[in-house]
Image (cartoon, grey):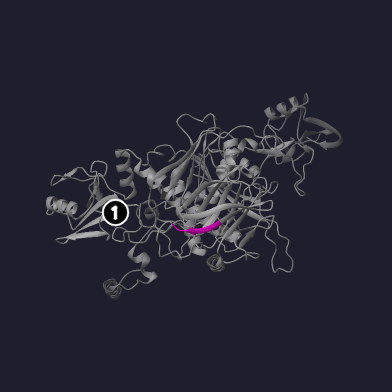
């Protein structure tokens, strides 16, 4: 489209008045070299903007929550496997930026395999084999495609040059995701569309066939991506059952030179109009293996018209290379009571085919942790992440008890080995005590990364030490460690203003612990200059960000487990307030939750004591060292009225009506310590250890 004078005048007036520009002007205003094909949809962000820190998502600091060693040898020196809780877009931004000291130069460009099985974004409900509701992924259409595309762009940058990615998806969005993967990774790097099993449904009275398979799209980052051939027992091509090797013919159509081969000591020409299928070296090898014979029941005439009795044949191998049809193995499994769990045999094939021992495997939709557990068993390093607390505790339990799980080599035998050292990190939700326990330099570094403070050359303005800039305006990190008894009060800000009044712009930022800030408002103005207070803990400063941050959202029922809500920004842990006890009625123990309230005032949350409860996670025999999840209960599970599956509004209404929530505990708890973790809908936790007594 070429712009004429009327178009230009119309566009100028539209810009002045703030009117939205018609879509047809897009390429005239922003000409771009068109690709051979491109998926166009609402909300599609430029690749450059996806990679940049912006208000949609930014890199945030990582915080170590817990380290596990388990007396196991590390896979490689100076490496611990990593499990991260938080929004995976922010995690990927942090890895891509490669500045956080915990992961600097350890992950970016060094990941050999990425496997992801994101919720499919359909709105369909998926049920487990035992009737448990798996999830209803509510982010649909263009939102889902863009949700996934942004993560794929960052994942490509994190891959090693010889790395690969495998993306599991279902029939609803597979065709869209294929086009996006072509855009991101390049159509020339597409390897396979792998067909795998999904939940088997054999419903009647449909107007279509039942859906029986999902797809894994397999791409390399470059043409040099690593690939290892994986083989399986020979299967019947039509029935899928294992079958014995068969004798097959050794000739193919067409002529080749030279035509003759030495077979079992004889120089033989191929049948008329054909050629021997194998080179002489391969025939010699087959003879050594005893896999060549002359079949006396078959006669033939060779290319020179000579008659022969005994056709050369070869015996097929007992094992054959795996092709792209993987319906010989399960598509889902329910070993950990976690919905939509990938089976270990599926991930074993994925990991073996694309990595070697010691390589790095990543899964940022880790779910039940199959990718990480199999990587561990195959002696690969791993990085995993998920936005769900249930996922994190499920994975943690799986790794802590991996020695009790089945071996990959012989499933009837236990694996027996402990997991390699791993750390649990938090990304976007931080423990305040751990922040203030940091050393001075570490605290300053954390605060600067948290609030995106840019470094500057000059560190002093008017005799006041400054720590950098935020969007062009100066920042000072309040040195609370040196100023005992001093607060960010009117006197402190006035002193700053006196020294820097004419040397800075209209804004000046002060980063300080909330307890050290005496001002209720977000800024204090003196002589036209605004001094903004970025408080730790921190929620929302609208002057600093164009969009409000979204908190992590934890599910209140099984059907919300894999909802695709994004959590932009960061928050600090505010443990909920809980009143509870263990009681005994006859032979049964009960955990009675008498009160549950959020640990902070938040207008987003209904002012009721149970409405922000997400789940209760229990270790029935706490050893005093490490929590290992034995069971979990969603808020919906604890409702007396939850004989049927409730929708979100029904759950909240029912919780409002409850006076006490009760958790039925196992009978054999006498004199045992029970550790309970209460999780609210924003991922905050309250932990307590109770004793089951008579």
Q: Which residues are magenta?
A: 593-598
Q: Which image quadrant is residue 403 in? A: top right
The residue nearer to you, when weighing 323 against 517, is 517
Residue found farthest to the front:
694
Q: Is residue 595 magenta?
A: yes
- Please identify the quarter of the rendering in which residue 526 is found: bottom left
Count of numbered labels shown in the rendering: 1
> Relative to residue 78, is residue 351 drawn left or right?
right
Viewer-nearest residue: 153 or 506:
506
Compared across the picture, whether 20 is left or right of 484 comes to right
Q: Position of residue 645 (x, y in %)?
A: 62, 64
Q: Nearer the viewer, residue 158 or 98?
A: 98
* Residue at x 53%, y 32% (from the top left corner): 358
- Left or right: residue 237 compared with residue 73: right
- In the picture, which quadrant includes the N terminus? bottom left
Magenta highlight on residue 356: no
Instruction: Decide: is 319 above or below 10.
Output: above
Residue pointed to by mark 1: 534
Q: Main secondary structure of the magenta part?
A: strand
Residue at the spot 31% in from the left edge and 59% down from the top edge: 541
From this viewpoint, is residue 388 visible? no
Q: Residue at x 70, y 41 (%)?
A: 254
Q: Position of residue 298 (x, y in %)?
A: 85, 37
In this rendering, does residue 619 appear at all?
yes
- Give how far across and how far down residue 151 sits, in percent: 46, 52
Q: Position of residue 36 (x, y in %)?
A: 47, 57
Residue closer to the observer: 572 or 216: 572
Is disc 1 surrounded by few (<14), some (14 to 19) or many (20+) residues within 10 Å? many
The kind of secondary structure element at disc 1 is strand
């Amino acid at each position: 489209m070429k712009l004429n004078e009327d178009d230009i005048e119309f566009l100028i007036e539209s810009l002045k008045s703030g009117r939205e520009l018609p879509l047809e002007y897009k390429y005239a205003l922003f000409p771009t070299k068109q690709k051979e094909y491109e998926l166009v949809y609402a909300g599609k962000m430029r690749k450059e903007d996806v990679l940049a820190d912006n208000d949609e998502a930014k890199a945030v600091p990582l915080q170590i929550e817990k380290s596990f060693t388990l007396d196991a040898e590390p896979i490689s020196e100076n490496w611990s496997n990593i499990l991260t809780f938080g929004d995976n877009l922010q995690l990927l931004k942090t890895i891509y930026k490669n500045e956080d000291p915990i992961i600097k130069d350890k992950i970016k460009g060094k990941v050999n395999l990425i496997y992801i099985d994101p919720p499919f974004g359909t709105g369909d409900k998926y049920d487990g084999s035992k009737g448990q509701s798996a999830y209803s992924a509510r982010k649909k259409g263009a939102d889902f495609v863009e949700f996934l595309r942004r993560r794929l762009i960052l994942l490509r940058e994190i891959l090693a040059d010889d790395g690969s990615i495998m993306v599991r998806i279902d029939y609803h969005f597979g065709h869209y995701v294929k086009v996006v993967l072509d855009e991101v990774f390049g159509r020339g790097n597409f390897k396979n569309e792998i067909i795998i099993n999904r939940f088997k449904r054999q419903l009647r009275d449909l107007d279509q066939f039942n859906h029986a398979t999902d797809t894994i799209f397999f791409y390399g980052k470059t043409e040099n991506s690593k690939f290892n051939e994986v083989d399986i027992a020979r299967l019947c091509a039509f029935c899928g059952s294992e079958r014995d090797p068969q004798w097959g013919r050794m000739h193919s159509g067409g002529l080749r030179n030279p035509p003759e081969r030495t077979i079992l000591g004889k120089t033989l020409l191929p049948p008329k109009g054909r050629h021997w299928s194998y080179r002489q070296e391969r025939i010699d090898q087959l003879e050594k293996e005893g896999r060549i014979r002359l079949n006396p029941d078959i006669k033939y005439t060779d290319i020179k018209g000579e008659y022969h009795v005994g056709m050369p044949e070869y015996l097929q191998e007992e094992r054959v290379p795996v092709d792209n049809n993987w319906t010989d193995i399960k598509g889902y499994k329910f070993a950990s009571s976690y919905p939509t769990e990938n089976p270990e045999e599926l991930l074993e094939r994925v990991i073996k085919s694309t990595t070697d021992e010691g390589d790095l495997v990543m899964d940022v939709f880790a779910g039940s942790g199959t990718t990480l557990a199999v990587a561990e068993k195959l002696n690969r390093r791993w990085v995993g992440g998920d936005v769900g607390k249930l996922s994190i505790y499920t994975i943690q339990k799986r790794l802590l008890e991996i020695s009790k799980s089945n071996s990959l080599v012989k499933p009837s035998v236990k694996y027996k080995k402990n997991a390699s050292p791993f750390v649990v990190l938090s990304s976007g939700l931080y423990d305040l005590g751990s922040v203030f326990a940091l050393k001075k330099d570490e605290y300053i570094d954390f605060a600067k990364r948290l609030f995106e403070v840019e470094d500057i050359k000059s560190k002093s303005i008017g005799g006041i030490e400054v720590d950098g800039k935020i969007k062009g305006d100066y920042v000072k990190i309040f040195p609370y460690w040196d100023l005992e008894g001093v607060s960010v009060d009117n006197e402190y800000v006035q002193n700053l203003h006196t020294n820097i009044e004419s040397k800075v712009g209209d804004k000046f930022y002060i980063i300080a612990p909330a307890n050290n800030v005496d001002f209720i408002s977000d800024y204090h103005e003196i002589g036209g200059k605004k001094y903004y207070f970025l408080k730790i803990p921190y929620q929302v400063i609208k002057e600093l960000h164009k969009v409000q941050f979204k908190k992590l959202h934890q599910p209140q029922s099984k059907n919300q487990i894999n909802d695709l809500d994004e959590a932009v920004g960061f928050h600090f842990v505010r443990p909920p307030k809980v009143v509870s006890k263990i009681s005994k009625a006859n032979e049964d123990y009960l955990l009675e939750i008498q009160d549950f309230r959020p640990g902070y005032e938040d207008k987003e949350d209904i002012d009721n004591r149970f409405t922000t409860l997400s789940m209760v996670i229990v270790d029935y025999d706490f050893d005093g060292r490490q929590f290992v999840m034995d069971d979990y209960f969603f808020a919906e599970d604890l409702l007396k009225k939850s004989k049927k599956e409730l929708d979100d509004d029904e759950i909240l209404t029912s919780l409002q009506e409850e006076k006490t929530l009760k958790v039925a505990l196992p009978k054999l708890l006498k004199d045992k310590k029970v550790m309970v973790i209460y999780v609210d809908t924003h991922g905050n936790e309250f932990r307590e250890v109770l004793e089951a007594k008579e």
